[in-house]
């Protein structure tokens, strides 16, 4: 098997993926585009073509590109990736909230279906933007994708409950797999499950190696967290590789093996009694507007 840039290992997953399987959290990087002032992660170039090598290895055919924190509100690199990957790709942009209706509709035409607000590593946003951004994108039917610390998440329950758009929480909701009783992690986890059950939110099983205290998706502490989401709302869970693993390519932690990430997902699906078809095909199709197979 060919070596894939920014992915450890060379083997395919043990589990075969269903046709139309979607990787719902991928970034692309290109040195032609400047990093935003204050950007904390400055990974090397990782192109759509590089990512296609990972698709051949793990068996996904659909993908969602997310503008990374590196570029602030500059979506050009992500849009280039969408153009290269074609109709089997969708995008999640980062916006300031002052964009014109024409600009937002242009992004929609190019494949964008959501907006990300990164309150962990972001360089262009605060929690005060939750409601303005949601109102801005609601007419387009987009969702608001959030990455925020559990303390911040738990403190904004009332706001999240009343947003006029769907909310997508990436990286397991940033919930520590082992949360102290009565702590912010438990409060945030309870809020996430409430929003999932009420049909107000979605969760991405992505970045498990980031939330794990052991910095690996092999961490058994991830199992009950993943299974809790799958059992709570199996129709509201998607999966993402988080390729090219910016924290790893920047040297912060070991590089994940994406075939093992797929196999660990299947471990959680078996434990929860949920089909791969649902999480990898049906749910992404509903959330991102992919056409039926």
Image (cartoon, helix red, strand yellow):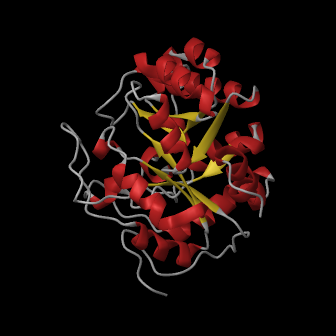
Look at the picture and state if 159 lies above or below 17. above
Q: x, y percentage for residue 67? A: 40, 47
Query: Residue 30 lies in what quarter of the image?
Result: bottom left
Q: x, y percentage for residue 153? A: 50, 23
Look at the picture and state if 126 lies above or below 283. above
Residue furthest front as drawn: 102
Residue ID at (40%, 72%): 50
Q: Is residue 261 visible?
A: no
Q: Is residue 42 visible?
A: yes
Quadrant containing the C terminus in the rendered view: bottom right
Query: Residue 229 lies in what quarter of the image?
Result: top right
- The front one of 193 and 132 is 132
Q: x, y percentage for residue 55? A: 54, 72
Look at the picture and state if 277 lies above or below 11. above
Q: x, y percentage for residue 53? A: 47, 76
Residue ID at (41%, 76%): 4
């Amino acid at each position: 098997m060919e070596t894939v840039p920014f992915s450890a290992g060379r083997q395919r997953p043990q589990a075969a993926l269903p046709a139309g399987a979607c990787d719902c959290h991928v970034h692309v990087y290109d040195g032609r585009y400047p990093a935003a002032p204050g950007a904390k992660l400055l990974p090397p170039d990782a192109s759509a073509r590089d990512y296609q090598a990972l698709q051949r290895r793990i068996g996904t055919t659909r993908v969602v590109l997310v503008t990374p924190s590196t570029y602030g509100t500059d979506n050009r690199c992500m849009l280039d990736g969408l153009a290269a990957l074609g109709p089997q790709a969708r995008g999640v942009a980062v916006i300031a909230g002052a964009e014109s209706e024409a600009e937002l509709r242009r992004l929609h035409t190019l494949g964008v279906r959501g907006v990300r607000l990164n309150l962990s590593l972001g360089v262009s946003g605060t929690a005060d933007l939750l409601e303005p951004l949601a109102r801005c994108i609601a007419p387009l039917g987009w969702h608001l994708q959030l990455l925020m610390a559990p303390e911040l998440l738990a403190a904004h329950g009332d706001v999240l409950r009343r947003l006029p758009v769907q909310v997508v929480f990436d990286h397991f909701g940033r919930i520590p797999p082992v949360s102290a009783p009565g702590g912010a992690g438990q409060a945030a986890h309870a809020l996430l499950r409430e929003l999932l059950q009420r049909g107000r939110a979605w969760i991405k099983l992505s970045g498990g190696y980031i939330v794990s205290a052991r910095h690996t998706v092999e961490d058994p502490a991830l199992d009950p967290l993943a299974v809790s989401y799958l059992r709570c709302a199996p129709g509201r869970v998607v999966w993402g590789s988080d390729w090219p693993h910016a924290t790893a390519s920047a040297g912060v932690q070991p590089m994940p093996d994406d075939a093992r990430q797929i196999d660990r997902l299947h471990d959680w699906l078996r434990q929860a009694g949920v089909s791969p078809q649902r999480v990898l095909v049906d749910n992404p199709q509903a959330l991102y507007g992919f056409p039926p197979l």
